[in-house]
Image (cartoon, grey):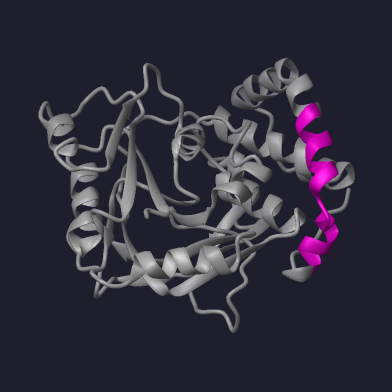
């Protein structure tokens, strides 16, 4: 019986979704997983990619009529999954030929209220050997105020920024997922409402990680599983700044205490992108209020307790 569905969105990625799919299925797991591949309205793709992807059984290919963005695509695929376990990845990944599938299923079954991420093995277009990566990352911590940010050139990254953990920790608990290699129980994803509410891109990992901890779950790194992630110099699509700002504002309004929110927002420079994000916040006010009420009803750990657990400085006005 299949227990795991792999959700893989992509946008203008060429043949990378195919290569990623092959690396998954050629490990001997083609009969044991479902794969949902979401084309987020690509405009430039090989003509034969669709046929090549659909050659493989247990693969469902979805094409969006408009671009939704990564958080909504991940929620779309997770909602479609018919299995109790889900692994969310990017479309430029490489898998080892090892026992990763059984390990993932066993870990989810042993801790169904934990959001896991695997070790992220860093690859690039000139180095694709997942067995000898350039370096490894182990999840992330969160800089609530990103003091190293250049506010003139990157104003949206001045708060709530995930930062790689570059060395193994003494224990498996981590403040934040990162690496596009997340696995979890579908029921837990439903309880914390996944990435619901986020726009096109940005700050998705802090959002889902904070919610997990505050709802009584955990975020953990599994160093026994390594998935290669190809890091690119440039993305094959255009991104705007306002969705990133919106997502940070959304997090502030839904899961962060008002006093901390005020302290954080002082560090975001007001630009046209900020104004656009704020306008959408006003439009979505009723949705945001409902979200905050829901999270208040399920959270058992305070934001301050979460910050203290991981020695994160709590900003004050």
Instruction: Locate residue 110: give its quadrant.
Output: bottom right
* Residue at figure coordinates x 64%, y 39% from the top left: 193
Which quarter of the figure is the N terminus placed in? bottom left
Is residue 75 found inside the magenta-colored segment of the image?
no
Instruction: Locate residue 99: give its quadrant.
Output: bottom left
* Residue at figure coordinates x 69%, y 17% from the top left: 279
Query: Magenta span: helix, strand or loop, mainly?
Result: helix
Position of residue 316 measured from the top left corner of the image (x, y, whole percent): 87, 53
* Residue at figure coordinates x 27%, y 62% from the top left: 95
- Report the label total: 0
Is residue 305 found inside the magenta-colored segment of the image?
yes
Query: Height in image: 12 above or below 64?
Result: below
* Residue at figure coordinates x 77%, y 62% from the top left: 307
Of residues 220 and 273, the one drawn nearer to the viewer in this rendering: 220
Position of residue 21 measured from the top left corner of the image (x, y, whole percent): 23, 49
Among all residues in the image, which is located at the extreme bottom?
Answer: 170
* Residue stretch rendered in magenta on the structure: 290-308
Among all residues in the image, which is located at the extreme left?
Answer: 48
Decide if residue 207 is on the left or right side of residue 23. right
Position of residue 300 measured from the top left corner of the image (x, y, whole percent): 83, 56
Q: Does the image show residue 140?
A: yes
Query: Height in image: 7 above or below 279?
Result: below
Position of residue 290 measured from the top left corner of the image (x, y, whole percent): 79, 28
């Amino acid at each position: 019986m299949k227990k795991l569905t792999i959700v893989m969105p992509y946008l203008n990625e060429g043949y990378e979704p195919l290569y990623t799919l092959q690396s998954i299925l050629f490990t001997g797991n083609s009969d044991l997983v479902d794969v949902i591949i979401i084309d987020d309205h690509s405009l430039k793709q090989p003509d034969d990619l669709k046929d090549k992807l659909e050659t493989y059984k247990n693969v469902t290919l979805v094409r969006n009529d408009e671009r939704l963005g990564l958080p909504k695509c991940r929620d779309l695929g997770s909602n479609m999954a018919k299995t109790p376990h889900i692994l969310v990845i990017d479309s430029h990944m490489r898998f080892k030929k090892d026992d990763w599938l059984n390990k993932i299923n066993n870990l989810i079954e042993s801790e169904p209220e934990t959001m896991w991420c695997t070790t992220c093995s860093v690859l690039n277009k000139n180095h694709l050997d997942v067995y000898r990566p350039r370096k490894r990352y182990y999840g992330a911590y969160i800089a609530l105020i990103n003091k190293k940010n250049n506010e003139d050139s990157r104003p949206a990254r001045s708060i709530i920024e995930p930062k790689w953990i570059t060395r193994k920790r003494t224990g498996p608990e981590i403040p934040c997922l990162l690496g596009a290699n997340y696995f979890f129980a579908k029921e837990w994803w439903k309880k914390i409402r996944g990435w619901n509410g986020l726009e096109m891109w940005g700050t998705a990992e802090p959002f889902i990680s904070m919610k997990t901890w505050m709802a009584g779950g955990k975020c953990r790194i599994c160093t026994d599983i390594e998935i290669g992630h190809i890091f690119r110099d440039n993305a094959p699509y255009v991104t705007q700044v306002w969705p990133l700002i919106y997502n940070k504002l959304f997090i502030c309004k839904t899961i962060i205490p008002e006093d901390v929110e005020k302290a954080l927002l002082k560090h975001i420079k007001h630009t046209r992108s900020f104004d656009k994000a704020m306008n959408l916040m006003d439009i979505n006010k009723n949705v945001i209020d409902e979200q905050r009420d829901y999270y208040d009803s399920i959270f058992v750990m305070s934001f301050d307790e979460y910050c203290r657990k991981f020695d994160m400085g709590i900003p004050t006005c």
